[in-house]
Image: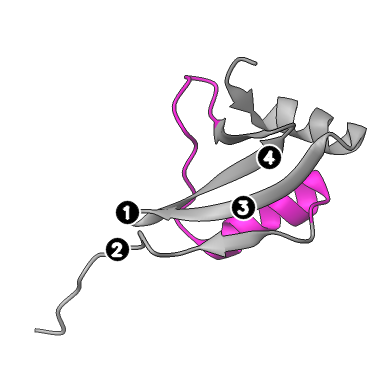
Amino acid sequence: MANLTEGTLRDLVEAGAVRNVSVAAQGEGWVVLAEVGTRWKPVHNTRGRVKEWKSLDSLAGFLRDKLGVVRWSVEASQYAPAQRSAI
């Protein structure tokens, strides 16, 4: 399978081919991984790069509102938010 785009993921979800969805921290952002068959595939943008969301709120909206996915797991061990100083 080529890169998993948003459109392809939508089609796979509608067809019932996605077994699980996971959200994983990557630096300051979040990526979506879908289990299709026996493989986990990240969602890519149209330029072929792994798509990254800056907030869990926007990512949750994408999964729920655009794909109809209401259950997913979250892996936050690689989360590294930007450090901001009050000074």
Residue at 63% across / 27% down in the picture? Answer: 5
Q: Helix, strand or loop at disc 2?
A: loop
Q: What residue did someone put label 4 on? A: 35
Seen in the picture, residue 11 relative to 1 is either above or below; the reply is below
Q: What residue did someone put label 3 on? A: 22
Please report contact status of discs 3 and 4: CB closer than 8 Å, yes or no: yes
Q: What's the CA distance linking mark 3 and mark 1?
A: 16 Å
What's the amino acid at mark 2? Ala
Q: What's the CA distance linking mark 1 and mark 2?
A: 5 Å
Q: Which corner quadrant of the image does residue 72 belong to? A: bottom right
Please report contact status of discs 3 and 1: CB closer than 8 Å, yes or no: no
Image coordinates of residue 69 in percent, x first then y, are: 79, 52
Q: Nearer the viewer, residue 52 or 33?
A: 33
Nearer the N terminus, badge 1 or badge 2?
1
- Point out the stretch of residues depicted in magenta: 44-69
- Mark 3 or 1, which is nearer the eye? 3
Dot 3: few (<14), some (14–19), or many (≥20) neighbours within 10 Å?
some
Residue at 44% across / 64% down in the picture? Answer: 76
Q: Which mark is residue 27?
A: 1
Image coordinates of residue 53 in percent, x first then y, are: 49, 50
Nearer the N terminus, badge 2 or badge 4?
4
- Magenta stretch: residue 82 in it? no
Dot 4: few (<14), some (14–19), or many (≥20) neighbours within 10 Å?
some
Dot 1: few (<14), some (14–19), or many (≥20) neighbours within 10 Å?
some
